[in-house]
Amino acid sequence: MSKRIYIFDTTLRDGEQSPGISLNSNEKLKIAKQLCQLGVDVIEAGFPASSKGDFESVRSIAKNVRGSTIAALARTTRQDIDRAWEAIEYAEQPRIHTFIATSDIHMKYKLKMEPGDVLEKAAEMVAYARSLCPEVEFSPEDAARTDKEFLYRVIEAVINAGARVVNIPDTVGYMTPDEFGGLIRSIRNNVSNIDKAIISVHCHNDLGMAVANSLAAVENGADQVECTINGLGERAGNAALEEIVMALKTRKDFYNAYTGIVTEKLYRTSSMVGFATGVHVQPNKAIVGVNAFAHESGIHQHGVMSNSETYEIMTPESIGLRQSRMVLGKHSGRHAFEEKLKELGYSNLNQEEINKAFVLFKDLADKKKYIMDRDIEALITQESSKANEKYKLEYFQVSSGSETVSTATVRIRSKDCVSEEAACGDGPVDAAFNAIGRAIGMKVNLDEYSIKASTGGNDALGEVTVKVSKDNTKASGYGVSTDIIEASVLAYINAINHIESRFQESGRIEREEFAFAKSCNYFGAGEIDNWGLEV
């Protein structure tokens, strides 16, 4: 009989800890809803005690997502556990996930605690968490490098205290598959009350073995796998959800296990997370990379055309990557467009969102002869990233050449206020960014800038992703257009809107708000504004 493996997704917690990633509450809620549709059993929504913004995001997900368990991370302290419970108490199925390090190196240098004190603290805080929440998960951080006898004692103690899920993390990605599988097997054989808990695993990818280690754990008795979409996570990332799930599905004959994941939604979820985080997967990424089902070699092409199973062990359709059945263009109607949206996995859009998408599609169809699936995905992603935007582009113009100084003029609207500014720069994009900064009155650091074509051809959409930062707050922005300068301008404004959103979530008021108001003549000459600045 096949064994059910529970999928615990930590994209919104561990995944967001990837360098350069910063999601706002609205983005996290959208991703959480998509994860629920994907069939994820547990969504680790965040670490509520880490910031006010993270707390609000977790609470929003707990209130609005139904169908998956919503977990919140907490250290083994009453303050953290109280904050976690306050964030998830309205969830349909809440879970507190608490942890403390158990390896010698962590206890000595990070915690500065004796093993006996760590053991007592773990059991005490699990019991406290259990008094608040019906489901508690415990993780002995750096379990892979923990003395086994001590690890057995800790696991037994927390199960007795009320933990019903015990997670074994390879926190630094140190173990090999044989070692990690053996560790899970030894826990099964040496913890007397292990039958009262689910064994979970959480593997990092520092040596590139996170997926292999997770699957080895499944072979040896693990019941739950903790992973992230696209393998996001600290340092080299975590085990990739899509790889774990498709390995179990494709090699069911070997693992004799299955998950509740709707695999046809994997590609859509991967794309959504990639756009939201600004971290797109490499072309040769297993399962969801653009080359995963591409064949260039003549021998391979001949084999696939004769029988796809010659070189494809799974179908593109099994992950939601469908071959186009309809070619859309300027003469295509609303019905055909809505059918295409459903085919691409956007069945959850409301009528207002569909109407906006259709207008964008028609505008693009006037510029391109044929509209590809990837073009539509790019348009939908750009539109969804505009939620709660404060600043909107009304107009831009650039002048640039090899013998002239690049200049740009932009007009930005915020509610009823319009600001127009011009600036010079090292090229048209830099000039446009400088003009936007002057118009809005907010100076941000441009950390990354990337551009790619959605599809081939001279009329392809240009997709621009930027990452910006200001005062330790980071955000990414996304823009698309057949004009790469326009795509760049849209992405930059989108990133600034995300920065503004993060400031609002943290309760912070920006001085730069004054600069925009001043440029819009909100104040009369000589007046004093709320910051005590003379206008």
Image (cartoon, rainbow, N blue to C red):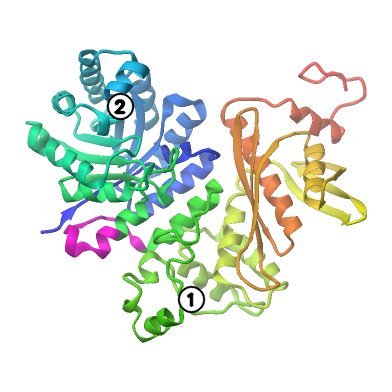
Q: Label 1: how many residues lie within 10 Å, few (<14), some (14-19) or many (20+)?
A: few
Image x and y of residue 86, in percent: 38, 26
Identify the residue position indicated by label 2 in the image.
99
Label 2 residue SS: strand
Looking at the image, which is closer to me, 274 or 170?
170
Task: Indicate whether 338 appears above or below 400.
Answer: below
Q: Quadrant of the N terminus?
A: bottom left
Q: Type of residue at label 1? A: Glu
Is 276 or 32 nearer to us in this picture? Answer: 276
Residue sitting at x 43%, y 68%: 321
Measuring from the top left, give residue 343's x and y in whole percent. 46, 70
The residue located at (53%, 42%) in the rendering is 26
Amino acid on which disc 2 is placed:
Phe
Q: Report the magenta residues as a range.
A: 247-263
Gap between marks 2 and 1, in whole Å? 48 Å
* Disc 1: which residue: 296
For label 1, the SS is loop
Residue in front for this viewpoint, 155 or 329: 155
Measured as percent of width and height from the top left, residue 495 is found at 65, 43
Name the front one of labels 2 and 1.
Answer: 1
Q: 133 left or right of 73? A: left
Percent x, y for residue 335? 54, 74
Asked whether 535 falls inside the magenta stretch, the response is: no
